[in-house]
Image (spheres, helix red, strand yellow):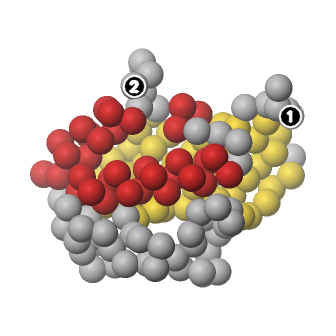
Amino acid sequence: MRPTLDNPRIVAAPFGDRFAHVARLDVGGGALLLLAGQVGVDDDGHVVAPGDVVAQSERIFEIVGGVLAAHGASLADVLHIRSFLTDLDDLPGYAAVRRRLFTATPPPASTTVEVSRLFLPGAVIEVEVTAAVPAAR
């Protein structure tokens, strides 16, 4: 096993070097990716559509997709999604975005929790992802 921490160049890291956006653990012919919690921010670190769970969810999965692509994976390779919502009443909007993006049956394993707030004002959702990078073909 060989662990590495990474901020892929093809995806903006709006928080600079404050944390790695992905931890990669190479095992056998593939790898396991553990993505840090992502919030719906633009490339400058500003929350997109403050208070709007749908717009923020879409942006989060756009970022997640870019991080995965930088490592040779895609949303189809996601194993588990951990979501933090500031209001569980927003779950239907978030679920609609997930249903549109994750069409496989069954979808990835999931954990969703309600939190009192997130670290950026206006952010209403944060998402962590675990994915498997397929072996090189």
From the viewer's perspective, is residue 60 above or below residue 109?
A: below
Report which quarter residue 117 is drawn in: bottom left
Identify the residue under disc 1: 28
Residue 37 picture location, percent across and down: 48, 62
- Tell me where residue 26 appears, x and y as whole percent: 81, 45
Q: Secondary structure at mark 1?
A: loop
Q: Earlier in the sequence, mark 1 or mark 2?
A: 1
> In this figure, which residue is indicated by the disc labeled 2?
103
Q: Residue at x 82, y 26 (%)?
A: 137
Q: Amino acid at mark 2?
A: Thr
The three-letter code of the residue at mark 1 reads: Gly
Please rate how many residues cluster around mark 1, counting C-alpha atoms within 10 Å: few if below 14, some from 14 to 19, many from 20. Answer: few
**Residue shown at the point (17%, 42%) measured from the top left:** 92
Vertical arrangement, residue 104 with respect to residue 124, above or below: above
**Which image quadrant is residue 98 in?**
top left
Q: Secondary structure at mark 2?
A: loop
Q: Residue at x 37, y 64 (%)?
A: 40
